Each structure stands twice: as structure tokens, then as C-alpha cells.
Image (cartoon, rainbow, N blue to C red):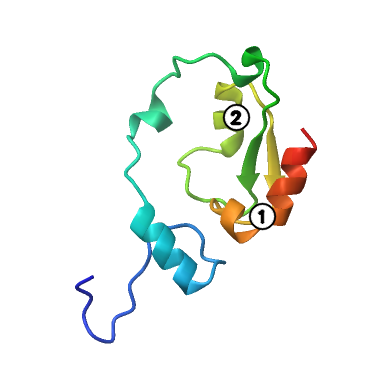
């Protein structure tokens, strides 16, 4: 990766509670997200309007979004459910995410 010897890279993931190997893997798989996702109105139907059970799960220690997660959940007509973990809690705390998903 071109890191200087003795310098530990900081990974661009928010899964700081994951093992270093998992952080490295996630970092390699990340793709850029367009900034307009955070600012522009959504031009899509609300998930509940599609007839599919939906929820918006956020990590208790998520600090990746520039606004509160509840605001993003409201944009798609959902109430957020908070589970322990970071933004990658599906990888780091799958049991908590599964329980929240099954309670939809």
C-alpha cells in the first residue's frame, strides 16, 4: 500500500471495534459515496410504500454521518432502531443487527 515503515495506516472505515484484518478488508472494498446522498432530496418511494417490511438500523457509536441518523431515517419514512456498534455493525455485531431486523 505504500505506507512508510513503522507507520500504522488509519483505515477509512468506521469499524474501529473490528479486528484489524477486518478493517483492512473493508477498507479495500470501500467505494466512494456521492456527497449528494447526504444533501439532496430523495427521488424514490418510501420503503414502506413498497409493501416490504423495512427498518433503519443505526449503530449507537456511529459518527460517520454529518447529520443525526434519525434525520436520514425520516427521509425514507422510517424510525431508526439503534443497536450497539459502529456503522459496520452488521460485520462487528451481527447478532444485534439480526435481532433488530427480526423484530420488524
Q: Residue at x 54, y 53 (%)?
A: 88
Camera-side residue of 83 and 96: 96
Q: Quadrant of residue 69?
A: top right
Give the percent coordinates (x, y) of residue 7. 29, 81
Q: Rounded to the nearest whole Å, what is the CA distance between mark 1 and mark 2? A: 20 Å
**Residue 73, numbered label:** 2
- Is 68 situated above or below 88? above
Q: Looking at the figure, which quarter contains the N terminus? A: bottom left
In front: label 1 or label 2? 1
Badge 1 density bin: few <14, some 14–19, many ≥20, Cα 10 Å = few
Residue at image position (77%, 39%) is 102
Residue that badge 1 annotates: 94
Q: Is residue 16 left or right of residue 32?
A: right
Vertical comparison of 27 with 36: above or below: below
Residue 33 horizontal/vertical position (percent): 35, 39
Q: Is residue 12 something one can see in this rendering?
A: no
Q: Is residue 1 left or right of residue 85?
A: left
Q: Secondary structure at mark 1?
A: helix
Amino acid at each position: 500500500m505504500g505506507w512508510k515503515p513503522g507507520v500504522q495506516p488509519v483505515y477509512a472505515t468506521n469499524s474501529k471495534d473490528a479486528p484489524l484484518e477486518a478493517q483492512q478488508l473493508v477498507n479495500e472494498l470501500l467505494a466512494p459515496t456521492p456527497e449528494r446522498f447526504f444533501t439532496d432530496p430523495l427521488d424514490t418511494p418510501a420503503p414502506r410504500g413498497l409493501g416490504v417490511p423495512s427498518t433503519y438500523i443505526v449503530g449507537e457509536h456511529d459518527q460517520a454521518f454529518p447529520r443525526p441518523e434519525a434525520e436520514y431515517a425520516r427521509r425514507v419514512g422510517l424510525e431508526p432502531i439503534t443497536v450497539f456498534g459502529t456503522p459496520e455493525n452488521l460485520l462487528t455485531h451481527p447478532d444485534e443487527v439480526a435481532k433488530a431486523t427480526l423484530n420488524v
